[in-house]
Amino acid sequence: SFGITNEKWLVATRAAVTTINGTVAGGIAALIYTQLRTGGKYVLPENVASGILGSLVSLTPTCACCHTRDSLAIGFVGSIIALASVDAIKNRLQLDDPVGAIGVHGAAGIWGILAVGLFADGDLPGIDVENGGFRLFGVQLLEAVSVIGWSLGCMIPFFYLVGIAISRDWRNPRMGLRVSPAEEISGADSYFHDCGDLLDMSSSRHALSLSMDLEAPIHAATSAAKVEAKE
């Protein structure tokens, strides 16, 4: 049957609660991570956002088959895995992943797949799954390896051929897939959409607004000094 009928409303309710719990735990983990990463000085919004997204991704495979209390651990760990992966990919490996997609959707997603093998409870109403254990964990591990292998095996040749088709240079297919390093530095908006003047104007307006905000107290203090001198 389609829709939320019979015991499906229990599954939907459980999925909603576990998702919320995991998100809360992921947000807390992200706050802790960004504080430790900056030596307790800052809370980096991009880290908090990536951590919350990582917790949501990790709860996607498990939200219907785990207990609500387990979702806290799944979301917490998923957030840390996502953030650590993003830092490793961008800062250590120097790979171009500006939105952290590999860490958030890749690493946290793999953790979510494996978490099914650890936390699944077949006794929960409304679902048909075996209990977590070595066998189910092995099945989930095989699934993760299969997905990674299929993705790499299909996408690397696909984008290589697409790059060659566009660049007409089999030795440098990158030219068919990306802009040049110089265009990256100057900004794709300026290169493709010729809106460099608009960006410069926006920056000038921001600088002017900041300058006016800084000068306002100075003018006020000067005016007050003049009034006092007249008196």
Image (cartoon, helix red, strand yellow):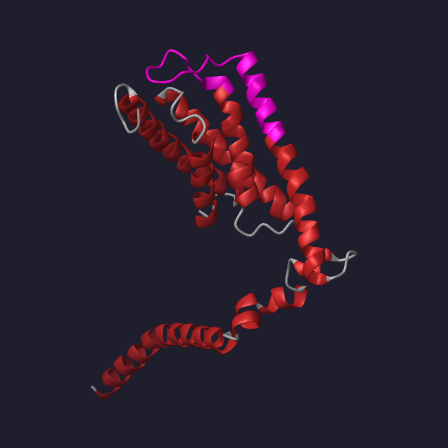
Whether residue 229 appears in this view of the structure is yes
Segment tinted magenta in the rendering: 117-146
Q: Residue at x 48, y 14 (%)?
A: 132
| Nearest the eye: 150 or 120 | 150
Specify whether 24 is left or right of 226.
right
Whether residue 93 appears in this view of the structure is no
Residue 21 covered by magenta stretch: no
Quarter of the figure that contains the C terminus:
bottom left
Specify whether 66 is left or right of 145.
left
Q: Residue at x 51, y 33 (%)?
A: 109
Task: Determine the residue located farthest toward the left in the rendered image.
Answer: 231
Residue 134 covered by magenta stretch: yes
- Residue 78: % across, % down: 49, 32
Taking 153 as reference, is 131 above or below it?
above
| Nearest the eye: 129 or 220 | 129
Quarter of the figure that contains the N terminus:
top left
| Nearest the eye: 42 or 221 | 42
Q: How many marks?
A: 0
- Residue 107: % across, % down: 56, 35
Task: Determine the residue located farthest toward the bottom in the rendered image.
Answer: 230
Taking 172 as reference, is 88 above or below it?
above
| Nearest the eye: 161 or 195 | 161
Q: Residue at x 46, y 73 (%)?
A: 203
- Residue 63: % across, % down: 39, 27
Q: Quadrant of residue 123?
A: top left
